[in-house]
Image (spheres, rainbow, N blue to C red):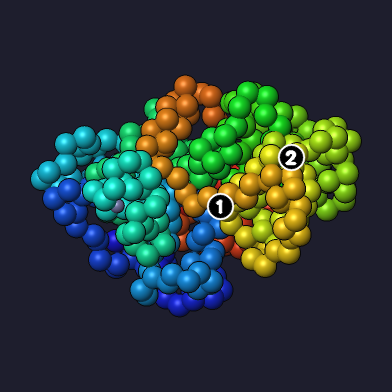
Amino acid sequence: MKAVILTGFGGVENLKYVEDFPKPEPKENEVLVRVKAVALNHLDIWVRMGALPVKPELPHILGSDVSGVVEKVGSLVKTVKEGDEVVIAPGLSCGVCWDCQRGKDNHCKDYDILGLKSKGGYAQYVVVPERNVIKKPKNLSFEEASSYPLTFLTVWNALVDKGGIKPYSRVFIWGGASGVGVAAIQVAKSFNAFVIATAGNKEKMKRCKELGADMVLNHYEEDVVKRVREVFKEGVDIVVDHVGEATFPKSIQLLRKGGRLVFFGTTTGSRAEIDIRYLFVREIEILGVYMGSRANLFKITELFERGVYKPVVDKVFPLKEAPEAHRYLEESRHFGKVVLRVD
Ligand code: ZN
């Protein structure tokens, strides 16, 4: 099959397009999906660079967010059949342990993300367990459907499960133009929150506003903490941080007493310095988020189908151009998601 394989860790030159990679075979409880589109995540870049503690065996296939058509099902598969249009839930787990059964599958000891250790969607075909296959919202194209699983799953966990968002919560989102940013703005607005987002240029700021953000700040040019405190003297209820070292101290300063910092991803580094006295005096909670319960993806998918959430696809590249797509994402030229089309 056609695939873009990772042959070594480092720059984009390690991504190689081939046409003779072995096609996977589904086991009895698995589904073989003919990939139509696969969206990029920052995770793809970290795996490519070998920057994570977990490294896949090489050659590897990246790609966590997949949409496509069911090509073949194992003998025990009941819920989907050949020809069904589907999206794939990117979190892989054992399905039977205590954490999996109580809906905390992201705490499973065998937890993996499609494209992290297991082979992902930068290919014509991918195999996943039946429980990871969800019917594609009919109103979305394949490119659009590939754009939401990982980011919305993570953001839902951050804002709803961990952050405890309520109607009219005040939510601050760093990097509103990123994949998780566009998800966070929409999820927060669906709870009628007051949303403050940041972006790096005028065009991105305008688009954050169009997506529903009530207030948008330029994180390069403005004193973000001062600006927020002008509107909400006591601070905000929830801050969504996926930037890390560069923003973490400010994230804490943005919070009101009892506020929550929900965070995942550390694109600027992972060594943040904070004065911990500030945390207990103000009863601030810092909550780490890693993916989320697969069950929530059914709810999120329903909300896409009902038009509550809108996919934000910035640019579609053909599979062959995966290296260019990686560069585009690394240079932060995107608003929303970057997708590879697989023919
Ligand atoms: Zn498990």
Q: Examine the image and state in which quarter residue 21 appears.
A: bottom left
Amino acid found under the numbered disc labelled 1: Gly
At 33% from the left and 34% from the top, the residue drawn is 135
Image quarter hosting the N terminus: bottom left
Q: Examine the image and state in which quarter residue 164 appears.
A: top right
Amino acid found under the numbered disc labelled 2: Lys
Q: Position of residue 196 (x, y in %)?
A: 74, 36
* Image position of 16 with respect to 99: above or below: below
Which residue position is annotated with label 1? 288
Q: Position of residue 134 (x, y in %)?
A: 33, 37
Q: CA distance from mark 2 to mark 1?
A: 19 Å
First in sequence: mark 2 vs mark 1: 2
Tally of numbered discs: 2
* Image position of 289 with respect to 208: above or below: below
Q: Does residue 51 appear to the left or right of 86 in the view shown?
A: right
Which residue position is annotated with label 2? 257
Q: Does residue 187 appear to the left or right of 105 in the view shown?
A: right
Mark 1 is surrounded, within 10 Å at the Cα level, by few (under 14), some (14 to 19) or many (20 or more) other residues, namely few
Residue 35 visible in rendering: no
Q: Position of residue 311 (x, y in %)?
A: 54, 35
In the image, 275 versus 181, the foreground residue is 275
The local secondary structure at tag 2 comes to strand
Q: Does residue 159 appear to the left or right of 210 in the view shown?
A: left
Q: Examine the image and state in which quarter residue 260 appears.
A: top right
At 35% from the left and 41% from the top, the residue drawn is 103
